[in-house]
């Protein structure tokens, strides 16, 4: 691990280059993908900041593959990421939460050795009321044998990720990512247009203060899930209650809990018996990040990183955050 003094100004480009030098066999392709994602994040951040002034708020008048009404910023963010990544010769395929199938690399561009999956604008339904939103991404190696990418390259278990990260567009824009060697956060300085290292080696507390869950679904939870939530609220007399904080934007809730500790939970319920969040675009990349920060993630039974996807838009229940809190939830769900 490269170390820096308190007075060092470390851009994300410098940081990635320094990390790459630790691995003599690195080709630079993964670094290039991270650069491209950082560029896309800057473009999206600029549009988000101007959303109330430009004609970019509100519905785009169409639904995505999930059946959800797309927001104008959803469409913009999706197109921005695709255009930032499709021509570099580093990717064989892409997958987006907004697209039904695999996004192939155009034939006029060189095919690469990696694939990227992304949620272009998580929490976008909140953008009209100025709630923080975010981008989530996951990077895996090409595993198919043909010259071009296939669904096989996208549908890999979380343990096969080589990098994952998210960008939160809030009071400041921050990019957080891991390549399996710790979690590092970079804050965008708009005056120079650069992401600067602001939070090296991020760690989540072993147990935390915050419970992030949508209480509106309580009537539809199973009894084991209700038992978990009673415990975290301190209603069964076994522990002090946690502070309930729920934004409704996964990136925002996850980001807060990464700093303060706690657990984000989106359990299965009778309306969504298989869960609501997407394994490949949301649960798996955030699981990689939280584990690298010392936390844990489960669907209530299985470690999220171990789940082998069976479809591109597979949904899962999710309990993610501080390790002790996630383990407690898993124990209570089994009892």
Image (cartoon, helix red, strand yellow):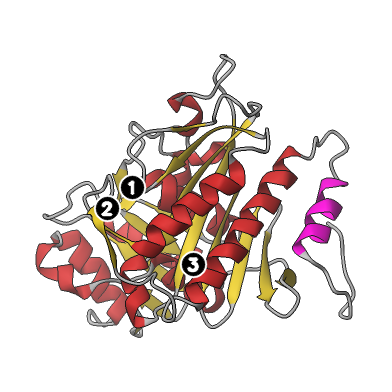
Asked whether 16 or 161 is in front, the reply is: 16
Q: Looking at the rendered structure, which numbered label has been put on residue 256? A: none
Residue 187 picture quarter: bottom right
Residue 13 belongs to magenta span: yes
Residue matched to label 3: 322
Cα distance between the residues tagged 3 and 1:
16 Å
Mark 2 or mark 3, which has the lower sequence index? 3
Mark 3 or mark 1, which has the lower sequence index? 1
Residue 25 position within the rendered picture, expressed as x and y whole percent measured from the top left: 84, 33
Q: Is residue 66 visible?
A: yes
The magenta-colored residue range is 12-21
Identity of the residue drawn at 83% across and 60% down: 14
Q: Looking at the rendered structure, which numbered label has been put on residue 301? A: 1
Q: Looking at the rendered structure, which numbered label has been put on residue 334? A: 2
Identity of the residue drawn at 62% across and 53% down: 37
Residue 73 position within the rendered picture, expressed as x and y whole percent measured from the top left: 40, 64
Residue 140 picture quarter: top right
């Amino acid at each position: 691990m490269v170390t820096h003094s308190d007075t060092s100004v470390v851009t994300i480009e410098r940081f990635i280059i320094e990390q790459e030098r630790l691995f003599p066999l690195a080709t630079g392709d993964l670094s290039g993908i991270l650069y491209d994602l950082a560029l896309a994040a800057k473009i999206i951040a600029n549009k988000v900041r101007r959303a109330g002034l430009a004609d970019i708020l509100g519905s785009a008048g169409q639904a995505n593959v999930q059946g959800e009404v797309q927001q104008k910023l959803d469409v913009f963010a999706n197109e921005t990421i695709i255009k930032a990544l499709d021509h570099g010769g580093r990717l064989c395929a892409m997958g987006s939460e907004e697209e039904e199938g695999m996004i192939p690399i155009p034939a006029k561009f060189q095919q690469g050795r990696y694939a990227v999956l992304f949620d272009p604008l998580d929490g976008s339904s909140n953008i009209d009321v100025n709630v923080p939103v975010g981008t989530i991404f996951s990077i895996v190696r090409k595993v198919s044998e043909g010259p071009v990418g296939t669904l096989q390259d996208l549908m890999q278990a979380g343990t096969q990720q080589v990098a994952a990260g998210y960008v939160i567009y809030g009071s400041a824009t921050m990019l957080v990512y891991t390549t399996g060697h710790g979690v590092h956060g970079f804050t965008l300085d708009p005056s120079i247009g650069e992401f600067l290292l602001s939070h090296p080696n991020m760690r989540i507390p072993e147990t935390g203060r915050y419970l992030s869950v949508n209480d509106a679904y309580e009537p539809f939870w199973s009894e084991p899930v209700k038992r978990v939530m009673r415990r975290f609220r301190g209603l069964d007399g076994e522990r002090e209650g946690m502070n309930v904080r729920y934004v409704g934007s996964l990136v925002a809730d996850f980001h807060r809990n990464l700093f303060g500790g706690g657990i984000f939970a989106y359990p299965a319920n009778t309306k969504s018996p298989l869960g609501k969040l997407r394994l490949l675009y949301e649960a798996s990349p955030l699981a990689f990040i939280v584990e690298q920060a010392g936390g844990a993630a489960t669907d209530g039974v299985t470690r999220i990183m171990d789940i082998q996807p069976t479809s591109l838009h597979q949904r899962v229940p999710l309990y993610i955050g501080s390790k002790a809190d996630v383990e407690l939830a898993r124990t209570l769900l089994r009892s």
